[in-house]
Amino acid sequence: MEPPPPSTDIPPPSPPEPAPRRRPGGRSARVRALVHRAVREQLVAEGYDGLTVDAVATRSGVHRTTVYRRWRDVGGLLADVLDAAADDGWAPPDTGSLEGDLAALNEEVAAGLTEDPPIAMALIAASFRSPEAAEALRRFWDDRYRRCAPVMERAAARGELPGAATDDRALLIAATAPVYHRLALLRAPADPALPATAARTAALAATAGAFTLPG
Amino acid sequence: MEPPPPSTDIPPPSPPEPAPRRRPGGRSARVRALVHRAVREQLVAEGYDGLTVDAVATRSGVHRTTVYRRWRDVGGLLADVLDAAADDGWAPPDTGSLEGDLAALNEEVAAGLTEDPPIAMALIAASFRSPEAAEALRRFWDDRYRRCAPVMERAAARGELPGAATDDRALLIAATAPVYHRLALLRAPADPALPATAARTAALAATAGAFTLPG
DNA sequence: ATCCTAACGCAACTGTTGTCGCATTTATGG
DNA sequence: CCATAAATGCGACAACAGTTGCGTTAGGAT
């Protein structure tokens, strides 16, 4: 993300890039916090269409040029905000059954996709314009999938999954994809029954061994 | 998409807007064809990021202003191109089994999402910026879902579906959503096995009655 | 052939987006 | 405290997006 630093002197010629000393303290951190806050506020106030670099700069009091230099575009802004917020202590629901866990998970997905301000939808939209936003979103989902491992472990312990190892991610995608498809792609109104139906479908298929890994 | 037909006479004076007589012939049709061709060519040449109104206008030889007036923005252009192309005689695959049909369908979906030029991806991206593109995409999917009815009819005739009526659309979404999710949202590389797996999962759930309509 | 006007072409204009060079501020190491 | 340079502020700029007013062309009806 950063341009190659000006090689001053004493360059141990192995890495010709002396990696300039960052200075994350004081002002930089303050600016970053100001901009993060402005992104969220701007999203609330004007929605995704109103989320431009200029608007964020004005609202934060930070200069346009600074925002462009550090975050490049709206996708970079959202990516950074998302990364900063990824350290919440999220844990998957625990309802006592695989189907129940998946249904609760789907409820959270649906809530996230329909919430206001539409942060999730904004990020998905941005991911089509900015590689950085796409990467951040991928990281986010990856983290969530990883944290969902206990769901499958508990299910296996309860005997809800076949003996062979299950492809956790395939199961999670099968369970949640219909919700994403309806809300994010078709943009159809939320169907209150869909989270449960999709969860039931995926749980059924999982029990039948549809996601067992080869070997 | 076209305004109400030109009520020539006998105007019950209720609407004070006489709805000017369209003139879709000759020049207008020629301009439309030129622009459509330019959109496709520009998409091939420069990708979605290079698909701007100006580029299309220049390439088509039609004036900027005309394109802005008739199509408003990139989303409008793509929407119109999609609508014009929706009259192909597409029919769902017929492989002899529900799972086979769904798998073949998923192969088509995967091929569409990974094809080059990325028309489908461009349209999905545009649907996040332009209401018209979103609407066109919805129409397109709606049309496709409708044309898939024979798949379920044949499956029911073969006894692959329970006696009660099946929610066709829910089944189709469950079958195809994982493919869309991986390729369009996660942007993960295409998994050659996914179309078949997702089809098997959905077919299994359908046979078990997961998509039967209430009543 | 003639008229009417929708559709188009044209040029000028405004506002937004993103970049660049340079001055200023301020972490940070010494 | 001092020196260095990373980070920011600032203004000007080019490129692009989108609009508007007005003149011109040509489709379609009489």
Image (spheres, coloured by chain):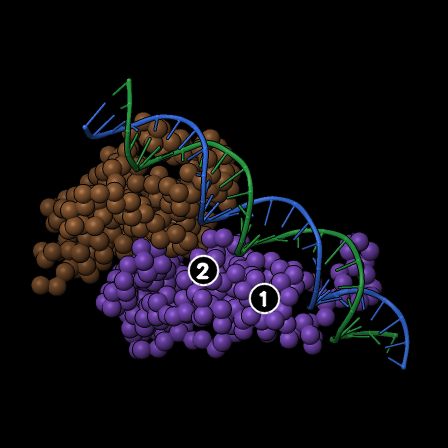
Chain colours: A brown, B purple, C blue, D green
1 or 2: tag closer to the N-terminus: 2
**In the displayed structure, would residue B152 be above or below residue A60?**
below
Q: Quadrant of the C terminus of chain B?
A: bottom left
- Neighbourhood count class around disc 1 (C-alpha, 10 Å): few under 14, some 14–19, many 20 upward: many
Give residue B49's mark. 2
Could you tell me which secondary element the residue under label 2 belongs to? loop
Query: Left or right of B32: which side holds A29?
Result: left
Q: Residue at x 27, y 56 (%)?
A: A174
Q: Chain of mark 2?
A: B
Residue D9: percent from left, percent from top? 46, 31
Q: Are marks 1 and 2 in contact (CB under 8 Å)?
A: no
Residue B48: percent from left, percent from top? 45, 62
- Nearer to the camera, A191 or A181: A181
Q: Chain of mark 1?
A: B
Residue A188: percent from left, percent from top? 46, 52
Q: Which residue is mark 1?
A: B57
- Nearer to the camera, D23 or D9: D9
Amino acid on which disc 2 is placed: Asp
Q: Residue at x 48, y 56 (%)?
A: B127
**In the displayed structure, would residue A98 be above or below residue D26?**
above
Give the quarter of the image for residue B183.
bottom left
Q: Residue at x 37, y 70 (%)?
A: B115
Amino acid on which disc 1 is placed: Ala
Query: Left or right of A130: which side holds D23?
Result: right
- Confirm whether residue A143 shows in the render: no
- Nearer to the camera, C20 or B124: C20
Could you tell me which secondary element the residue under label 1 belongs to? helix
